[in-house]
Image (cartoon, grey):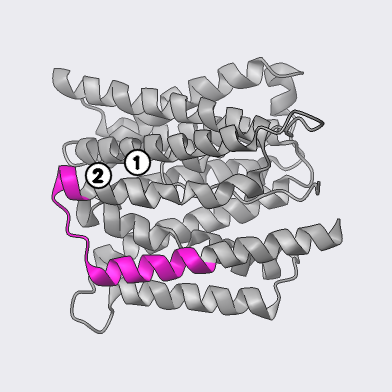
């Protein structure tokens, strides 16, 4: 098993994007739990889709800054509680060799979630996720110049094909391109930068430290912005907010359990099932239209992403 950090799993919501610290799976005779881990990852993807649907509902009624701030308060409490249970506790998590980069990661992720919710409201779940799925290709492209990782011609070809898929989705020459259509692309770029910075700090800090700084720095950053949008939610909307927070904590717990059972690289392809759940929820609950170019473009992007993942695993296996 290589110690090279895996990229964060596919996901758009704060709970997903924060990527809990992976715990090395138990190995040995009779301990293969990959099947259960895959089932849990599929369940996590479904919960993420529900979470994004709730974010769209609340984001359409309240300032997105307020919704993200409330989510991050709960997320930060969850992170602190999880960190306190690990060896060394919070005192160990505070000791980072790269405090500026850790803070930057938290701020960038909070901004990414804010942009995603705005995109959910303006574009809908389906088109937002279809474009956002390009972020693993962006990570692969950025990892070369910024991390010094070797990206061969096969992966560069896959990256280029993936961006062709984005053009198929957006149809820039078809008269349907709007500034709002660039929001999920911006979110994907922000999350790709977050992913690259996560790999960078993993060279000096353990995953538990990065996990702690992701939640706390993001909560502080979004509070500085969201507190100015403070207002009380309607009584019925607090129920939706509670459901949103419960989804976040549940998805985090199940994801951590999945990482305990199997390698992150084995689970990442199944995280793409979130696209299926998002499409069903978008069509059934929000009457979104599943356009043929979106389906075709998303298939191209996901296919390119899976091929890139395959090449990364091959490269990691050779280096090991």
Residue appearing at x 46%, y 40% in the figure: 42
Q: Secondary structure at mark 1?
A: helix
Disc 1 residue crowd, few under 14, some 14–19, many 20+, Cα 10 Å: many
- Residue farthest toward the front in the current orientation of the protein: 30
* Magenta-drawn stretch contains 303: yes
* Magenta-drawn stretch contains 55: no
Q: Which segment did they paint magenta?
A: 283-304
Q: Where is residue 48 shown, x and y percent of the image?
A: 39, 38
Residue 271, placed above or below residue 73: below
Q: Where is residue 149 shown, x and y percent of the image?
A: 74, 66
Judging by the rendered image, the residue that carries numbered circle 1 is 49
Judging by the rendered image, the residue that carries numbered circle 2 is 281
Q: Nearer the viewer, residue 221 or 34?
A: 34
- Residue farthest toward the bottom in the current orientation of the protein: 173
Relative side of 222 to 307, left or right: left
**Residue 123 seen in the current view:** yes
First reached walking from the N terminus: tag 2 or tag 1: 1
């Amino acid at each position: 098993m290589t110690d090279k950090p895996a990229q964060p799993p596919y996901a758009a919501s704060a709970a997903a994007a924060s990527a809990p610290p992976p715990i090395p799976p138990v190995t040995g005779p009779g301990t293969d739990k990959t099947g259960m881990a895959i089932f849990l990852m599929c369940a996590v993807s479904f919960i993420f889709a529900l979470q994004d649907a709730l974010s769209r509902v609340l984001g359409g009624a309240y300032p997105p800054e307020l919704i993200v701030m409330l989510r991050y308060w709960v997320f930060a409490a969850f992170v602190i509680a999880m960190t306190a249970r690990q060896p060394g506790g919070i005192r160990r998590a505070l000791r980072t060799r790269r405090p500026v980069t850790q803070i930057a990661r938290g701020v960038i992720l909070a901004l990414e979630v804010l942009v995603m919710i705005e995109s959910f409201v303006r574009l809908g779940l389906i088109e937002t996720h279809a474009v956002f799925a390009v972020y693993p290709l962006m990570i692969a492209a950025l990892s070369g110049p910024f991390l010094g990782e070797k990206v061969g011609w096969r992966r560069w070809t896959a990256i280029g094909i993936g961006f062709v898929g984005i053009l198929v989705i957006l149809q820039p020459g078809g008269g349907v391109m709007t500034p709002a259509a660039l929001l999920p692309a911006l979110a994907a770029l922000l999350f790709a930068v977050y992913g690259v910075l996560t790999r960078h700090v993993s060279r000096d800090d353990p995953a538990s430290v990065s996990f702690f700084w992701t939640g706390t720095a993001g909560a502080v950053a979004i509070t500085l912005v969201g507190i100015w949008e403070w207002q009380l939610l309607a009584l019925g909307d607090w129920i939706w907010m509670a459901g949103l927070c419960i989804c976040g904590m549940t998805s985090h717990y199940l994801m951590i359990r999945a990482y305990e059972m199997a390698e992150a690289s084995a689970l990442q392809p199944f995280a793409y099932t979130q696209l299926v759940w998002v499409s069903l929820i978008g069509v059934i609950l929000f009457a979104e239209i599943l356009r043929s170019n979106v389906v075709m473009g998303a298939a191209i992007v996901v296919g390119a992403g899976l091929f890139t993942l395959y090449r990364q695993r091959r490269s990691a296996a050779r280096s090991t």
